[in-house]
Image (spheres, coloured by chain):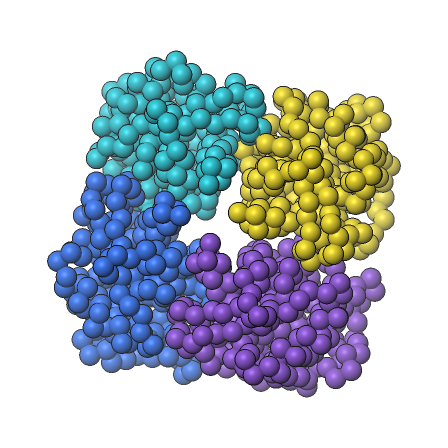
Chain colours: A purple, B blue, C cyan, D yellow
Amino acid sequence: MGCRIMTDMLQPLTGERRELEQRELLCEMLRLFYDKGWVSGTGGGLCARLDDGRLLVAPTGVHKERVQPDDLFLVEPVEGTIVRPPALQSLRPSECTPIFRAVIRARGAGSVVHSHALSAVLAADLADEGALLIHGLEMLKGVRGAASADAHLVPVIVNTPRESELVEQVEAALADPRFEATGAILVSDHGAYIWGIDVWEAKRHTEVYHFLFEAVKARRA
Amino acid sequence: MGCRIMTDMLQPLTGERRELEQRELLCEMLRLFYDKGWVSGTGGGLCARLDDGRLLVAPTGVHKERVQPDDLFLVEPVEGTIVRPPALQSLRPSECTPIFRAVIRARGAGSVVHSHALSAVLAADLADEGALLIHGLEMLKGVRGAASADAHLVPVIVNTPRESELVEQVEAALADPRFEATGAILVSDHGAYIWGIDVWEAKRHTEVYHFLFEAVKARRA
Amino acid sequence: MGCRIMTDMLQPLTGERRELEQRELLCEMLRLFYDKGWVSGTGGGLCARLDDGRLLVAPTGVHKERVQPDDLFLVEPVEGTIVRPPALQSLRPSECTPIFRAVIRARGAGSVVHSHALSAVLAADLADEGALLIHGLEMLKGVRGAASADAHLVPVIVNTPRESELVEQVEAALADPRFEATGAILVSDHGAYIWGIDVWEAKRHTEVYHFLFEAVKARRA
Amino acid sequence: MGCRIMTDMLQPLTGERRELEQRELLCEMLRLFYDKGWVSGTGGGLCARLDDGRLLVAPTGVHKERVQPDDLFLVEPVEGTIVRPPALQSLRPSECTPIFRAVIRARGAGSVVHSHALSAVLAADLADEGALLIHGLEMLKGVRGAASADAHLVPVIVNTPRESELVEQVEAALADPRFEATGAILVSDHGAYIWGIDVWEAKRHTEVYHFLFEAVKARRA
């Protein structure tokens, strides 16, 4: 639906209705993120896990604000095989799918957003020893488990020619104890992966981290 | 309603209709402030006083642009006890409620907005001796009682781990004769509290102060 | 209407329908300018001349994006007397009215916009000897009669405590041969007055000059 | 339609319906680009080639976000003669038409956008030996045939008093082997021409290049 304000308001629906609701919600998120400039030029993407563990994944190479509920792929999470493609045969699943699956495996995420925001690129430019330090900002409280006084470290990994080649670095970052508290991974020259336990938390984290990226950049300018 | 342009156009309505109107207006303001980036990532909040003195207060920890009229808390202003919670039991009242009440007590405010805008954070960084000096800007006239030639001082208090711990500093700032003319308090690393005699004046002050924060920052860059 | 794209498409209508059309158009412009941040915090304003020479003037001190067609004042242009006030008695005509009338007298303008944009304030900060020099920008062609190779001078006058006290400086700027080509006057610390032969040209000039103000500022940063 | 997400989804329609669809799509693009600030102040423009090779071209000197499907010119591509003007006789075809035709001739473009964005002007300011170097940005993948590791060169030509005088420089840039990979030409002090094989690719390239212009500027600031 996209009009509910809290995670726990989402009633447990039967599978089919729940899936349709999630498909509509993901399309709404893509429109919202497009308006904010985070998925322009067909860049970026997102996914969400259904109750049975299968993933809804946005198609790649399309204008994200125009994706319709039927355009999403249904993907098996362990092997990444496509359970049900969209009717439109020209669509291909997001190249980020292996990364989405790695984040879900390591963090139990229910939804992962891939941002192509300029603020993420510029924040990644400020990395030191593979990490962006964020501190002294109340908005940190918007990250699950974080407090405003934290020295919050976001991993910054190095961009690769193909998105699927990022998986190894993503897995290493997620396994690194320095980054236990993070809900995001920055990719230099590229953007960010941001996740949450469900679509609503992923939305909150996406807004929070973009605020933090802009704040860190503005303060160091 | 949300479509009237001046404070004094609001007809005195009977309690129930007036309360519904205010609930709808507050939700409209939350959507507007979200679009401007002032309450992103579930941050920020606001309240308004009804004619009988009771407060309507937005819930905390939710996507502010999606708050519905029925989601607001009705709060007794002196003790801060909840007179009527929303039907949705998972909602919690804003952590800012004690601060809202302090501003209402000290200044007779009819509405208080809590902003999480980046411009407020960056303006607070420019504080000197606990105050931000704003001067040489026509927009100062938008603050009740202020003139464009004023040396307008906005208090900047220090952020605390929990929002409720800010009350003491807020009360001290409101009692400080340096800040008699202010309609806002900045909180370092955090945002701002901005108020007015009613929702419309709080909206005007919110727009005016965000303009002033951006202007001061741009001029010192 | 607000949906026609060119000045000369506006059919000559009989007085009453023409006036209603202009009232609706002015309200549409206020909403547009509000969305762009040029008339926030109840600041700014605008007027348009009807075929009989009388002026429609926006009220002052109100949220500009919420002004309705019936809220505009009808003003006699020579003496500035109010021919017909809005039904809503609490409304007051814009304090800019004497300035609007001075621009109309000196330049034959059919519509004048008063902007409170931050970009205008920051551009005015760059004034040298009472003028902002704009050059080397194709967008200059958007100003009636100007070419992209022009050294275009916009007068920058000094802000005064009351808006009506600006008239003398406005008249001097409009009479200054240095500023023959301008379609705008900047007011330091305050904003700008921008005009055109009708509402559509005033809209074009308003967009063009704000682009130019931002460009000049960005290039000198 | 304007709601399809991929190029190849556009069914081959019979000529008349296809033309109407393209007219509506171009108007939608103008509204979108206006909202992003790329065609403000009546600046900018665009065209698209129909299946029979004839061009739909936006009128010049009008508020671009208000152009209606019937306001577009139908133009013969080789000589540039007007096949069918809009009903509204006051409209004139874009001055960019000769440039649009040069790009179509040299690159087989199906749609060309002319942007007046400030980010294009500021990026052109960074030109070195007639070119802007863009590198180290994943968003480069959004340009047909480009890879994120490319040293991507965009030609920057010198502005001329009249737009039609740019044709020679445009042709030289398009013939220059340095610029084989580009999907855009920057014009100093002016803006950019950006193209694609159809309207959807032109839209993608327009978003991608504006991102790249902003990124390059931000990194060099």
Asked if residue A59 can be seen in this view, the reply is: no
At x 24%, y 29%, the residue is C164
Compared to residue B75, the image places residue C160 above or below, namely above
At x 57%, y 51%, the residue is D219
Compared to residue B145, the image places residue C168 above or below, namely above
The image position of residue B22, as x and y in percent, is: 32, 63
User: Foreground residue, B66 or D177?
Assistant: D177
User: Foreground residue, C174 or D85?
Assistant: C174
Q: Which quadrant holds residue B155?
A: bottom left
At x 75%, y 63%, the residue is A161
Q: A55 left or right of C36?
A: right
At x 28%, y 76%, the residue is B164
User: Foreground residue, D59 or D190?
Assistant: D190
The image position of residue D118, as x and y in percent, is: 56, 39
Compared to residue D145, the image places residue B169 above or below, namely below
The image position of residue A113, as x and y in percent, is: 62, 69
The image position of residue A91, as x and y in percent, is: 79, 63
